[in-house]
Amino acid sequence: MKTSRRVVSLVFVVLLGAAVYGLLRTGKPPSAPNAGNKATSVAPAQAPIVDQTPLLTAQRLAQMPTSAEEKPFAEGALQLADREMDLAFAAAVRDAEAHPPVLTAEAKEIAARLDKAETALGADAAQVTQLSAAVEKAVGAKKDSLENQLEVAKAQQELDQDEVDDAKQDLIRAGGDPAGRIQKLVDEHEAASHSADSFHVAVTNTIEQHGLVHLFEEWSVLHKKQLTLWQAKQEAESAAAYFAERHKALETQIDAKKKSRSSAGAEQSATGGSPATLSGEQLAALVKSKKRSAADQKALSSFDQRIDDQKQLADNYGKWIEVVAAEQRALVHRGLIGLTFILGILLLGLFFDSWLERLLGKTRLDRRQIETLRTVTRVGLQVAGVLFILLVVFGPPGQLGTFLGLAGAGLTVALKDFIVAFIGWLVLMGKNGIRLGDWVEINGVSGEVVELNMFHTVLLETGNWTDTGHPTGRRVTFTNSFAIEGHYFNFSTSGQWLWDELQVVIPTGLDPYPVIDAIQKIVAEATAASSRQAEQEWQRAARTREMSSLTAAPAINVKPIIGGVEISVRYITRANERYQLRARLYQAAVDLLGGKNVALPAASAAAAVPSSD
């Protein structure tokens, strides 16, 4: 196994261990989280007459997707927030009654206009009543005159009524109408109560979806809800602290008033006074003081109830947060299971890739066949691994048939060239295909195959077969669609055999026959082993019955020319050795013509050793 593969495997193992640790941690019951900030005793921000934020927050949370485990807490939050709203409205009404607003100059002017309009309206009503009675008693022309006066009086009454209504609205806006303010509070409370009573918590029936993407979406929704719950919990705690401070201040104020009344009572007893002997003003002041004390006691009791409600609301939100955290933990647990599967798939892919590489290395197959099997198995493992990982990430499609049909149609149109190239690669991997190291000709370009992948074939260009076999240094890339749409020539068996030709001219005056016999003998001896091996490989490549016409023996051709006799000898050689063999044969021919003793050129080691194919 290579070092890089070992490093990658080690990284995957470490990540797998981290995922397993996360699975163990997320499998435990969740613990209640601690609030990031403690509740402060800051009063809520200035809002309308009555702050309905707790109820609106509870309704907003209940409108989010709610599970069966969350429903009791959502209903409890709505109930507590509704009760808190009732107490807030009651406190606002008491405050409006006990502390009437101080009239501003504008409010005083509007109040004077209201008094004037109401006086005029009263006079109009009396006049209408008087005229109505007179009309009933009158007859003739007098009755008609009285009816006309009655219509005018009614019209004037309507105008004065409009003036009274307008003045009342202006006075309410200016803050100078306690009764109108209280009525506005009552109307607002009735509307809020109707909204709270008509609101019901519905359990969201979610369909369990597989895939890391869907799990992340569900986790994001729960995370948003949890942040809202934390904010609501902190607001409830802040409100409880604020009401506690108000309760303490009011209690201190009541104690001070009690001490003051005790001192005043002691002085009155010392002077012999009693309620019966008090004057009317003193008695009215005493009654007013008693009513104020009773109102303070009611306010004190209201603060106690509101503090208790806010604490219960904060506790309810805290328990709700624990339920949401448990649901998030379950989603994280499922996500870690998916991540574990992905890491397991990657590790299994690396294991099988290494195992298949060692297994193919032990076989007695040809190098090109081993390389072909190695490529096919590696690509198969990669494709299978990607498909399994995609299933883990996105989950199985809901409508598998429709999905596959649409995906297949779209991919066929968009990836036509790649699909044809991939099918061409399958053809090239077949028994009549090409392999790495083959010498081929594709679309008029000749060269040696140096790269063969699923979509492209790369040649190292070597030029025309009969001109030169040396590489030009250029890499030529073809899409594998040529195997489907075009054609190619594969000049390769396992030995890559090639016919070459030796031409020698025997000058006039020299006996050609001994030279011809000697050259034929030299070529036959130099290519004997190559000829036998080439014939065997051609027979196997034909894959048919025994073909006697296939021969690799050297062939000699003698042709008279001007100035002598030309001898052409065709012989078989390996493509990558023909230049070395041709040079040795020409050297032997020159020595023969020069009258030297010629040693037969030895066949190359590669030609003499039989192929393992």
Image: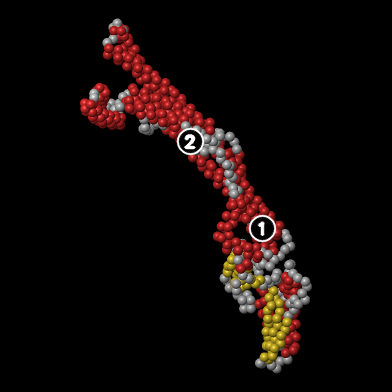
Q: Is residue 160 left or right of residue 84?
A: left
Task: Using the rendered view, name the quadrant where residue 418 is placed.
Answer: bottom right
Q: Position of residue 142 (x, y in %)?
A: 21, 26
Q: Position of residue 520 (x, y in %)?
A: 74, 83
Provide the residue designation for mark 1: 377
Task: Tell me whether the residue at label 1 lies in contact with that at label 2, contact meaning CB atoms closer than 8 angstroms.
Answer: no
The residue type indicated by label 2 comes to Leu
Which label's residue is closer to the chain start, 1 or 2?
2
Q: Name the one closer to the observer, 240 or 598.
A: 240
Binning the other alpha carbons within 10 Å of mark 2 as few (below 14), some (14 to 19) or many (20 upward) gives many
Q: Using the rendered image of the protein, determine whether residue 367 is visible from the camera's viewpoint.
A: no
Q: Specify the quadrant that holds the C terminus.
A: bottom right
> Considering the numbered disc 1 on the image, is that residue within a helix, a strand or a loop?
helix
The residue type indicated by label 1 comes to Thr
Provide the residue designation for mark 2: 61
Q: Specify the quadrant that holds the N terminus.
A: bottom right
Q: What residue do we see at 68% from left, 64% from top?
A: 430
Q: Name the one closer to the observer, 384 or 152.
A: 152
Q: What residue do we see at 23% from left, 26% from top?
A: 140
Task: Using the rendered view, name the quadrant where residue 595 is placed.
Answer: bottom right
Q: Which mark is residue 366?
A: none
Q: What residue do we see at 44% from left, 34% from top?
A: 56
Does 17 sit above or below residue 408?
above
Q: Position of residue 529 (x, y in %)?
A: 75, 75
